[in-house]
Each structure stands twice: as structure tokens, then as C-alpha cells.
Image (cartoon, coloured by chain):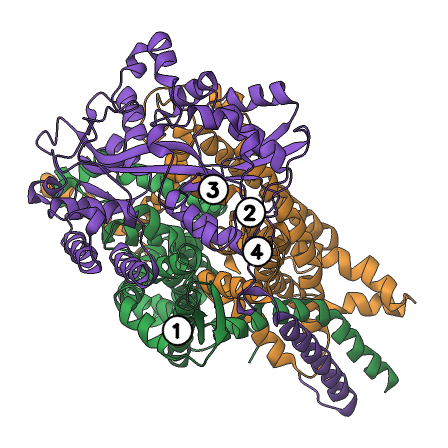
Amino acid sequence: MAAAIRRRSVAYFLLFPGAFWLIVFFVIPLYFMAKLSLDTEIPGTLHYHFTWHWDNYKEALELYDTQFVRSFIYAGIATFLCLVIAYPLAYVIAFKAGRWRNLMLFAVVAPFFTTYLVRTLAWKTILADESPVTEFLHAIGLAPNSHILYTAVAVIAGITYNFLPFMVLPLYASLERIDVRVLEASKDLYASASSTFWKVTLPLSLPGVVAGTLLTFIPAVGDYINAEFLGGANNRMIGNVIQSLYLTQSNYSSAAALSFVLMAVIMVVVFVYIRFAGSEALMGQEAV
Amino acid sequence: MRTTGKPGRSAALKLAVALAALAATVVLAACGSGIEGPVEATAAKVELEKKASGELVISNWPLYIDKKTVPNFEKATGISVAYHEDINSNEEFFNKMQPLLSSGESGGRSIFVLADYMVAKMMKLGYVQELDKSALPEVEANLSKSLRHPPFDPERSYTVPWQSGMTGLIVNKEKAPNVHSICDLFNPKYKGKVDFLNEVRETVPLVMKCEGVNTEKATEADWLKAIEKIGEAASSGQISRFTGNDYAQDLTNGNAIAVMGWSGDAVQLQIDNPNLEWRMPTEGCMLWSEDMVIPIGAPNPTAAEAFMNYVYKPEVQANITEYVNYVSPVEGVQEILVKREPALGKNHLIFPSASFTKNCSPTPTLEGKEEKNVIKAFDEVLNG
Amino acid sequence: MSATPATATPGRGSLSAETGVARAWRWLREHAVNIVAVLVVVYLLIPIVVIFVFSFNNPAGRYNFTWVGFTLSHWSHPFSNTELTNALLMSLKLALLATVISTIIGTMMALALVRHSFFGRRVTNFLIVIPMATPEVVMGASLLSFFLILGTPALGFETLLIAHVMFCISFVVVVVRSRLIGFDRSLEEAAKDLGADAFTTFRLVTFPLILPGIFGGAMLAFALSIDDFVISNFNAGSTVTFPLYIFGAAQRGIPVEVYVVAMILFFGTVLAMGFATLQQRRAERMTAIRPEQEESDIALPGIA
């Protein structure tokens, strides 16, 4: 019994620093942000006092509903594109790459090794109005007005690019776990290639799809670098708004309110999604 | 995996209590300081030491000084200078510094360079020290007449101008030969190829000028009407985006062919690409300046004043002007540059004559509720 | 997206032209997935190639956005820009410290979660997952609110370190935990049977075996920290890290050295990863534990 108690105190000892850090610097700040979102500024002083000012939420949402909706649309489209692009790649790496497998996996993570801002700026060069890529797309009729940069297309393309590895890796991990014999069995039973895919491969890779979708969608909604560098006046996302309210306008209450709503909406979306798609992907095998 | 037993529970309880106590401490510590704390007002005046020495930390905008001035100053005075190019936006820099300034500190910096309106705001909040003019004889002697009595600091007791400039049009004369006025930027011919500045105090007055409003007498309604016009142009795709200095990239890359821009940038851009050209809008331009100030709590204000004084020597200022190409606030620079670099010395963007700027107006100050409403409306446009 | 048919039917000799088309068509169909995959790989690598190429650019003015001419001068003096070099050093210092701290406390947490049963386990799991499911902008904003309300006198290196450790912990826990789960406990029991005490067992058996996992977690933490812009932007005060420098410089024109430094970081990471993979393989060969374990496990820090 004494040993059991000691073991437990060892557990709490091991747990303490991490839990302490996460509680003090993640949970408590959320409480402070909640408090700030209900504050009112004492006019002209940059000082705030607590007032249960729920109107902060109403005003912020009325002003910035467009950016809110836009963020979810952009992130949704980008996540879908990521899935469509990533699946064939993950499939090939898992089943067909052979000795190329490690090299292809390296190509998938390679973008992570270049600074996020620098690779986004590289897209700015690639998509510029007079760049060869834009001119080529214009020539084959894919870029009307030869104008891609500073449009929604550029922002969504940037997000898709930047979060693609987050989609490929979990997809690969779940595809790789599939027993090839199951696929062979399906073939032996005279299933066509496409029905093998739709009825066997895809369902078995679903955990990867769920994890990849979440890992892509969540950061994409809050992202503002792509909108900042690749977007124009009509493509600002909610992250840009929160950033500018906090850092350039010192309108802390509205910014805090928007951040809170953003977090809440994402939680709801994720929760609903997990209800439909299963929870193990997000929480890890042994949790919940 | 989970086992619940008395010992575990009590340990968990202890942990919970410890964390709760910690949380309570944090929350208690929150009272009395920070942005929810009471408002403190401070005022200070520079107290000079006998001789300037030691270390001096300066915050300025990027590419806003030549390479020689700082080392020469160090050599001449024995002061060692840490020169940071860490200001990219008036508001952002102010917000980063504000928590420090409100507790009477300057983050080790002794000179900030910020726009007139931001300096005025800092003065009102008591974040700026009053200068001791006895250490600024060169400023006294050489400060340009037109900059001596600005409304926000009538006797220049707190501020010394760093550089001035004009806000007008920069166009690609091959692709947008017919853009001569701010109104022309709204011509659908240039749809998606136009950048506006993200500075409310420059962009909106320029558009008001296009609307025929006298910017110095503009009412809140005039401001809001101009902002509405800008907003419509932005959502229709006429305006490609709102920029700071990065319009320069758009001009060089062909992403934009006509923009609102700053005179110094235009001189630089022209050197690289002769197709780019500054145009004085037919409606007139905006005139602005950025000022050096000594924030409260600044270490070594004596050295700071020595630096301010030093850059007001015409021969020193000539080097800076030669590099940054903005309008110099120091008299006597043109005479030096005409001899040394005639092309610059005679450039009317660097040394504008009174007739060249006859329709230009100073950047207006906004105050109180009007400021709040205007900025809110403009920000809504910026964030599309 | 079809699986490859096992055999190809022989062509009909008489209609040779049609067969050519048909054969090409079939070849395309069979290899469609592969072709798409290769295209995606190319897409992934394009910006890296662009960065590499533009690190040799010789722009006349301040803007490294259009190709002007080839020069080696930026590669021979990558650290001539002092503002940039200081920012890079700041980032490296910050990332190293954040990595050490988050790896230590993250590993401790992972050990507690896998090895011990205790009350509050679900809450702890939740506490670890939630930061990963929170958009960076919200994390940055809430920490800034915290510091603002507390009246933290100076935002700067300390607040950055706090923030970076905070967002790294969860990822370290997840990586190390996945390594611990696939751990053969019988080895520890063997050590105990041979008379080793708990600490000796940990030092001589457990620790060396989970070391590759810890290393993987540390690498991920380092990568996250050195690349972070959003959270840093909120909490840096006037401290400038490498990404913050780039963001500021993007206003006035990115110096070519930024591209050079980005490539140096790229190659550095590639080397570190190669090293980590080798280490892991060696560890696996030496212990011969779970030979079926994929060596790519550690090579994929991003999987989190």
C-alpha cells in the first residue's frame, strides 16, 4: 500500500511542472482573456475596467462577421483541397513507393524545414502578375486578367500549400497500417479496383482522414500570414482582424471577444465533426 | 487504467489546492497594475549631465539613416550607439511600448522616431520628456522655418523633426500614363492595379481632396463619406490592397501600376526602374513629418540630446538626405548637396519649393470621439 | 485512384495506331495515381527551389522579388546584415532554451501518463490536447491579455520563452508518449530481477530506450519554436526573432541574406534529421526491440 502511495506521488511529481505550465500560461490566460472581453475602456486612457460589457461581443461580431465567415470558408475549401491532393500522394507512399518511400516522405516534410514566412513569400514571387507561372496559367485560360496574387485564389492556395503536410502524414500513417492482404482478399473476391478502394481502403483509412482534416482545418481558420502576404483588400481573415485589433489599435476588448468566439466556434465544429467521425484521431489511442 | 482510491484522491486534492492557490496569487497580482489598474500620470524633464557619454539606444524605422552617421557620431562623441530599426508601424510600436511607458520605463531606449500624431498622443499621455534646449544649439539654428511651430508642440519643447515628406502618387508611366489625380485612381481602367496606403490620416484626406473637401476644415461626416468611397472601391476590387511601404514591391513586380506613395520611396524606386514616377496629385499632396522624442524613463538623455543636436549639423544631415531622399527638416542641406550631388540637390521631391507644394496640406489631427469613429470605420475597410 | 491491375491484356496487332492510343491510355490509367503523387511532390518542392534560386539573386535595388542576375556574394557573407544576424541568434537561443525546458517537463508528463495510474488522468489528457486544438492566434492573444492585465513590465525574451515552452509541451508529450506505449516493459522487469533499483533501471534501461522518442520530441519542439511567428508577434514586445524580422522586412523589401539563412536552416535541419534517423536505427539494432517498428516514426516529427 505504501508503495502504491509512493508511486502516485511520483506520478504527481512527474506531472506537476507540465501541468503547472499549461495551467498558468494556457488556462489562466484564457480566463484573463474572457475577463478582458467584458471590459470597458476608460476613455482616452488605454486603461480598462471590468463591466460585464456583453456588447463587446455583439459589436465585434456585427463589424467582423464577414471575416469570420470568410475564414471558415477559406479554411474549409483549403482543407478539402488538401484532402484531395494529399490522398493520392499518401496512397502511393504507403503502397507503391517501394524504395522511394523515404525520399517521398522527406519531400512531404521538407517544407517544414524552410521558415513559414519565407516559403509564403516564395509563393508571392511565384504568383506575381508578371511571373512565368501566372503567364502560363493565363495562356491556358486558368487565370483571367492574369491576376492571381491578392485574390481569394492566392490565399486559399497558400493555406493549402502550407498545411498540406499536416494532411499527408496522418493519411499515410493510417494507410500504412492497412494490411495489404485485406486489399488482396478484396481483389480475389472479384471486387473491381474502384470498389476495393471505396469499400475497403477508404473506410480503413478514415482515422487518418479525420486526424488530417482536423490538423489542417484548425490552424487554417486562425491563420493570417497567407491573407497578409497573398491576399488583397477583400481577403482578410479573422486572424488579421484579431491581430490588428490587439497590436495596432489596442482595442483589446473587441479583440478578446473575437478570439473567444473563434475558439468557441472551432470547438463546436470539432466536437460535431468528431461525433460523426470518431474521436480516437484527436485524443490519441489511449485517451477517452 | 484509472484507479480511484483515497490516497490518489487526496494527492489530487493537494495538487488542485496548490494550483488554485497559485491561480489566486496570479489573480491578486493582477490587481493594481497592468491595463486594468489605476491610471498614473507622469511628467518629466530631461536633466542634463555635464558631458555626454556612455551608451545610447535608438529606435527608428528601417532604412531611415545612412551608414556613416552613427559611426561618425560614435567617433565624435565617444558614445556607443545601439541603433535598432524596429519600428514598422506607429501604432504597433506604440502598443508594444505602452505597457512599459505606463510604468515609467522606456525599454532601455532613449530616442523614438514616430509620426506627428503619435508623438502628440504620447505627449498627452505624459510619455515624453521635455527637452533641455540649451543642449540643442544646432536644432535652434537650423530647423526649417516651416516646422518650428506645429500645433501639437508650438515651441518644439518635446519634439525634434527627423524627416519630412509628401504623400502623393507613384505611377508606372508606361502602363498608367493618364493617372494625374487621386480621383484617377478610381478609374475602372486600372481596376485591381491600384494600392492605397493603410494610413488613415493620409489616405482619407487625399480622397477628401478628390471630393473637393478642405481637409483642414473637414467634419466627421466628410471623413466617413470618403471612407465609404474607399470601402466601395475596395470591395469592388478597384483597390487591390492597402499597403505600407510594400507598395514598392507591387510596383516593381507589376502587381500595381498606380499607388498612393511617399516621396522618398519614389526617388529610390526611380533609380531602379525609370518607368516609375512620382506625380503631384492635381488636388495636392499631404505633408507629414516624423519626430525624435525622448521617452520617459529613458536612460542617458544627455547622449540622446547630443545625437539630436548632431544630426542637425547640415553636413551630417546632407549624408542622411542623400541616403533616404526625404524632405530634410534642416536648412543648409540643399546648398551642400547641390555641390556634391547636383541631381539630388535640384530634385524637387527632396527640396520642394513653396509653389510645388502650394495645394498640399499637413496631415490633420483627429481627436476624441471623432478619432475613434473615423479609425473604426477605416479599419473596417482595411479588414475588408 | 485505382489499384493497379495485375496483368495487362496483350494488344491486338491489326489495329496498330488505335492500339498505340489505347496502350497509352491504359498506361495513363494504370499510373494515374503515381503521376498525381509525383506532381504533388513537385508542388511541395517548388517554393523551396524558388527560395534556393533566389538566394543567388543579385537585385539592383532593395527588392528580391524578380530575378536579376546570379551572384555568390550573399552566400559568402550570409551574416553581414547585423539586424538579421541578431534576430537569428535570438531565435536560436530562444528555441534551444524552449526545447530543453519543454522536453524535460514534457517527457516527465509523458512518463506519468503512460507509467502511472492516478486520479485526474482524463483532465490531464484534455489539458494536453486542448492547446493543440487551439488556433495560434487565440493562444497568442490570450497570453498577451494575461501579460497586459498582470502588468508584466516588459514583454520580451522572458515572455517569449514562456509562450514557446507552453505551445511545445503538448507536442513533446504526444511524441514521447507514442514511444513509451510501444515499450517492452519486460526489459525493466528483467533489470529489477537482476537487482537494479528503480532509479538505476530508469537510468540504464528506460532512458536509453526512450531516448530516440525524446530526441524526436525535442526536434519537433525546436522546429516549432524557431518557426513560430504568430504567438511571438503577440508576446515579443520589442524583441526581434528571425520570423519577426522577416515580417518587418517584408514591408521594405526582403534582403537576399534572408533567403540564404532560410536555406542554411533548411540544410541544417536535413542534417539533424539524417542524424536522428541514424541514431534511431542504431538504437533499434542494438536493442533489437520491436524490429517491425518503422524507422520513419521519428523521421516524421510533423505528424504529432
Q: Amino acid at mark 1?
A: Val
Answer yes or no: is residue C259 visible: yes
Residue C70, percent from left and from top? 38, 19
The purple one among the chains is B
Sequence-wise first label, 3 or 1: 3
Mark 1 surroundings within 10 Å by alpha-carbon count, few (fewer than 14), some (14 through 19), many (20 or more): some
User: In this orientation, which residue lies closer to the viewer: B133 or B279?
Assistant: B133
Task: Pinpoint the chain carrying mark 2.
Answer: C
User: Which residue is the site of mark 3?
Assistant: A114
Q: Amino acid at mark 4?
A: Thr
Q: Nearer the viewer, mark 2 or mark 3?
A: 2
The tint of chain A in the picture is green
User: In this orientation, which residue lies closer to the viewer: C94 or A114?
Assistant: C94
Task: Pinpoint the chain carrying mark 3.
Answer: A
Q: Which mark is residue B42?
A: 4
Mark 2 and mark 4: span between their CA atoms? 39 Å
Answer yes or no: is residue C9 visible: no
Q: Amino acid at mark 2?
A: Ile
Mark 4 surroundings within 10 Å by alpha-carbon count, few (fewer than 14), some (14 through 19), many (20 or more): some
Same chain for labels 3 and 4? Say yes or no: no
Mark 1 and mark 4: span between their CA atoms? 37 Å
Image quarter for residue A19?
bottom right
Mark 3 surroundings within 10 Å by alpha-carbon count, few (fewer than 14), some (14 through 19), many (20 or more): many
Q: Is A155 on the left-hand or right-hand side of C282?
A: left
User: Which residue is the site of mark 2?
Assistant: C226
